[in-house]
Image: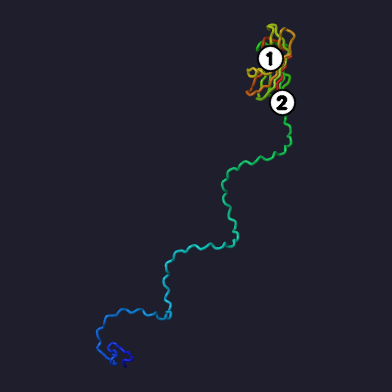
Amino acid sequence: MDCKDNFCTQNCCCAPRIERIVCCPAGATGTTGATGATGPTGPIGATGPTGTTGATGATGVTGATGATGATGATGATGATGATGATGTTGATGATGATGATGATGATGATGAADTQALSAFSLPAAPITDGGAAVFDLNAAQAGSDITHAAGSSDITITAAGTYYAQYSATVAPAGTTTLPATNIVSFELNGQTVSAGAGTAQFTSASPARQLTAATVLNVSAVPATLRVISIGGNFIYSEATINIFKI
């Protein structure tokens, strides 16, 4: 070994001037010098064997929702479900427009007539004092039971409410006790109340001749039984051939 080999070990080194190896006793180890600059990275070594699988890491934060995918094809219709309970009834709707009037139906059969009537009279001449009621001796005819009269009475009884027509006629002359001239007024009285409408009048300046006197009116009867009478005022008078007719209308 010579100095050309630039040989140097721990105890020997090359001395260039004398071109020989000089071996000396080892001195104390000097202080470690500063670390030299890192040399260039060596080539990548061969891949080592795969290590064992590590423990599963914690679940990461949920990522943002992805865009909605396209709608899939409509599935087959399922079986009809059971009928639900009936809901509460809704409010009544507004009344619809009135429909056209239907054709007139056939006329029904005529019902039985409900005739209510009475006719009474007095033939012999009979006096009636001032404010007195005419008396009817006999009944000529009666239909139904709503109007009744007892022969020889002044009262005619009405037992059913309704509208009635009454007509009275007689031949009248003043009695000898009547002061002339005199006016005889004949009117109807219903339940004690004078019916002014339809009163008949006859005026006398002498005892003769006799006058034909007529009175007629429509009566609205509500309170029953009702009593109807014919009243004479204006003095004392003689009546003959007196007749009253009354019927329900």
Q: Which secondary structure lies at badge 1? A: strand
Residue type (three-letter) at the residue carrying disc 2: Thr
> Tag on residue 147?
none
Q: Give the image location of residue 96, x and y in percent.
A: 64, 41
Q: Residues within 10 Å of mark 1 (few under 14, many from 20)?
A: many
Q: Position of residue 181 (x, y in %)?
A: 69, 7
- Relative side of 245 to 34, left or right: right
Which mark is on residue 115?
Answer: 2
Q: Based on the displayed image, in which of its 4 quarters is residue 146 positioned?
A: top right
Q: From mark 2 to mark 1, how far is it between C-alphas? A: 27 Å
Query: What type is the residue that disc 1 sits on?
Result: Val
Q: Earlier in the sequence, mark 2 or mark 1?
A: 2
Which residue carries the number 1 mark?
A: 186
Q: Quadrant of the N terminus?
A: bottom left
Location of residue 114 with respect to 27 vertically, above or below: above
- Disc 2 + disc 1, Cβ < 8 Å: no
Please tell me whether mark 2 sits on a helix, a strand or a loop.
loop
Judge the density around disc 2: few (<14), some (14-19), many (≥20) Cα neighbours within 10 Å: some
Residue at left 70%, top 14%?
Answer: 201
Please name whichever residue, 80 or 224, is drawn nearer the observer in this view of the structure.
Answer: 80
Where in the figure is residue 46, as x and y percent of width and height? 43, 81
Residue 59 placement: quadrant? bottom left
Q: Position of residue 127 (x, y in %)?
A: 69, 10
Using the image, determine if residue 190 lies above or below residue 92: above
Q: Which residue appears at 71% of the width and 11% of the height? A: 203
Q: How many marks?
A: 2
Image quadrant in which the C terminus is located? top right
The residue at the point 31 percent across, 91 percent down is 3
Q: Nearer the viewer, residue 88 or 63?
A: 63
Q: Nearer the viewer, mark 2 or mark 1?
A: 1
